[in-house]
Image (cartoon, rainbow, N blue to C red):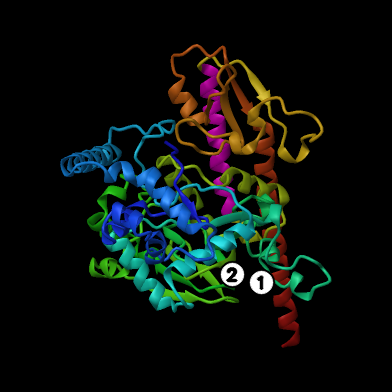
Amino acid sequence: MDSNPPLIGGIELDLSHLYHTVQSFGGIQQVIEKKKWQRVADAMHIPRAAQDRVSKVDDAYCKYVLPYDLLSVEEKERIEAEVVADYEKQLNRENSSDQQADDDDDDEFTNECVTKGRSMSLSVFSRIARNTMSMWYKQVPSPEEVEKDYWNLVTEQRRHVVVHAGNIDSSVHGSGFPTNRLIPFSKHPWNLKVFTNNPGTILRCMGPVSGVTIPTLHLSMLFTTGCWYRDPHCLPWIEYLHSGANKIWYSVPAQSSERFHSAMTDIMPEVCKDTVIWLPSDCAMVPPPMLVGSGCPLSRTIQQKGEFVIIFPGAYTSTIACGYSVSESVYFATRDWLLTASEHFQHIKESCEPPTFSLEKLLLGIATDLKENLETCQRILPLLKTLCENEKKYRTQLTLMGLKSFERLPHVEIQDKKKPKKRSYMDEEDRECEVCRTSCYVSMVVNSQDDTYYCLEHAVQQLHGKHLKSWTLVYSYDMDELQSIYQKLENHIKQEVENSSKMDASSKKKSVKKK
């Protein structure tokens, strides 16, 4: 049997709803004999604009539902009991602390309520969005109507509703903001394409990074959901609604994260992990009254087209789309974020979550550029010192363990694009530690036989007592270069402090003379 769900007008058909609708018309025999398929389609609010909707409903029932419909009552009860037992078994396996997830097992249960869908053009997405809206409403609904119906669907769990969303890299398919320099708004500081190069955000030192410093376009339709989420790096971000329907936002501030954790543990313990980053993305939506009733403070706002929403560092957010819309977002970071950046990345590492970008790359970008202000340079100096110390410590340990193979990795900006890359670890996004999934920007240990990657810390742990003939330490910077970068930054800070002191002294002298 075809495992792909049946589609009508681009919308996934709710087979359970189809079964119960047919039963409400007297069963399959009555529907066939009295030709009630059109009434069935109308009762399910399948859009009349959908091509061959009546015949497709008929075909879907015969192909997917009829085998179940023809079973006896006892057989149906037995199958339902088996399904419930299998669900509970897999749920327990998912929540078991000693269960290792197998990414290659297609049958593995997953809590995610947002999964990868099929690729489609913008026109197809727009058509599906229109059909989805016409299934639920005869006229444009208010945000309050959408909100009420959405939470009824979530809490009652009687309908199988599938909607789509799209996240698009604006560097590939274009931004919703003007980029033509002849248009005045193309240079406006609130244009998110310009915003990423604002002197106030330190992330600009990394250059273009997909999903971080490159704005992302978001396509939504009715009931498109952004599940409860907090950026693991605790970065602030900004989202602008270009056009379309409103978007409902819920938020829990960073200072209430413990109360949010406690509330979620009480309400949905099965989705809460026993790690620092305890809430996986795309897995949980909880009605606001339940969170508030559990002692968690919550804010709500409705974003309209032409409005910005700014998410503060560490805040948890979730969203519900009220219809077809196009929005755009990008991350940023002030120098204050550097005070806790190392802690956030350590939490990511301990939780075995892949970071979106490399903190090492950011620090070295700021340190080599030397264009940031004095306070920013002062804040990264201890972080850079720790980086150098750890690199020296682990490289020394690996050498003492017997590692003899070393390979220099060209910096991304100086690689010759015309020459073929030797190995996959030339791609920065591929340099992920097998244990902690951290991004290995400065150095890593690689097995030349099976392309296994370790960060230096876990290489020391995993390779202790093993033969290291097939292992190579691959690095972007040698220790002399790292020490030189650190020394230049330290000298730069001293020079800036001296210059600042001289300017202050000069200002005081001028002030005395005036008196």
Q: Residue placed farthest to the left in the image?
A: 74
Q: Would you say residue 382 sits in the magenta stretch?
A: yes
Residue 120's place in the image compared with 336, above or below, is above
Does residue 330 appear in this view? no
Residue 495's place in the image compared with 431, above or below, is below
* Residue 441, position as x, y percentages in the image: 61, 37
Q: Badge 1 local density, few (<14 within 10 Å), some, or many (20+)?
A: some
Magenta residues span 379-400
Q: Residue placed farthest to the right in the image?
A: 182
Name the residue rendered at 30%, 44% in the picture.
274
For label 2, the residue is 240
Q: Would you say residue 237 sits in the magenta stretch?
A: no
* Residue 209, position as x, y percentages in the image: 64, 50
Q: Nearer the viewer, residue 457 or 154?
A: 154
Does residue 426 appear in this view? yes
Name the residue rendered at 52%, 31% in the picture.
455
Q: Secondary structure at mark 2?
A: strand
* Residue 193, position as x, y percentages in the image: 69, 63
Q: Can you tell which mark lies on residue 190? A: 1
Position of residue 136 in the picture relative to residue 71 (left or right)? right
Tag 2 and tag 1, C-beta contact below 8 Å = yes
Q: Given this view, does label 2 or label 1 mark the residue nearer the observer?
A: 2
Q: Earlier in the sequence, mark 2 or mark 1?
A: 1
Q: Residue placed farthest to the front in the image?
A: 33
C-alpha span from label 2 to label 1 = 10 Å
Amino acid type at image mark 2:
Tyr
